[in-house]
Amino acid sequence: MKHTISILVENNAGVLARISGLFARRGFNIYSLAVGVTEDESVSRITIVADGDDYTLEQIEKQLNKLIDVIKVRTVKPDELLQRELVLIKVSCSAQQRHELISIAEITQAKISDISVDSMTLELSANESHLNNFQELLRPYGIKEVVRTGTIAIQKGTASLRI
């Protein structure tokens, strides 16, 4: 089962290495990892999407809480999350196909980030399934390159992970 773990850490060198090492030692596969500063520049938020059973997750949480630079750890249930990823997809694009790709961008609410003589780069921020569908829509045009960020997530409603 996939779990989304949100971790507040002190913004110090080596913190990410220690956290990813902890996951590796436990054999807990990381599917997605995103790091960014919070409203306090001395604190970073690490969002990890990983696969494992509940026991392994509990052990990871306990180990994370023992790390010096870790401030807070919270595993958020899927129904309590707003999750997004960003994807940039460069596709082959002839002059005749350009209008079709512009229509796909409008329908999917994607942004056209770059156009050249024989390619177009589209950008979309959405949940994982929407991005997967978007990529499948573009596959017939000939995908040249895909760049995808890790998942970022925030809890719905008034709950928040803060210092």
Image (cartoon, rainbow, N blue to C red):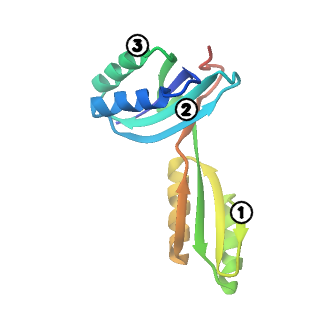
Q: Secondary structure at mark 2?
A: strand
Whole-percent x and y of residue 42?
65, 21
Label 3, residues with CA under 10 Å away: few <14, some 14-19, many ≥20:
few
Q: Secondary structure at mark 3?
A: helix
Whole-percent x and y of residue 99?
71, 78
Label 1, residues with CA under 10 Å away: few <14, some 14-19, many ≥20:
few
> Which image quadrant: the C terminus?
top right
Tell me which amino acid carries mark 3. Lys
* Residue occupying image coordinates x 68% and y 59%: 110
Res. 122 image quadrant: bottom right
Q: Are marks 3 and 1 in contact (CB under 8 Å)?
A: no
Whole-percent x and y of residue 29?
34, 39
Residue 144's tag is none
> Going from the N terminus, do you reach mark 3 or mark 2 first?
3
Res. 88 image quadrant: bottom right
Residue placed farthest to the bottom in the image? 96
Residue closest to the eye, 77 or 24: 24
Disc 1 target residue = 113
* Residue occupying image coordinates x 48% and y 19%: 73
Disc 3 target residue = 66
CA separation, marks 3 and 1?
Answer: 43 Å
Disc 2 target residue = 81
Residue closest to the eye, 39 or 49: 39
Label 2, residues with CA under 10 Å away: few <14, some 14-19, many ≥20:
some
CA separation, marks 2 and 1?
Answer: 28 Å
- Mark yes or no: residue 3 visible: yes
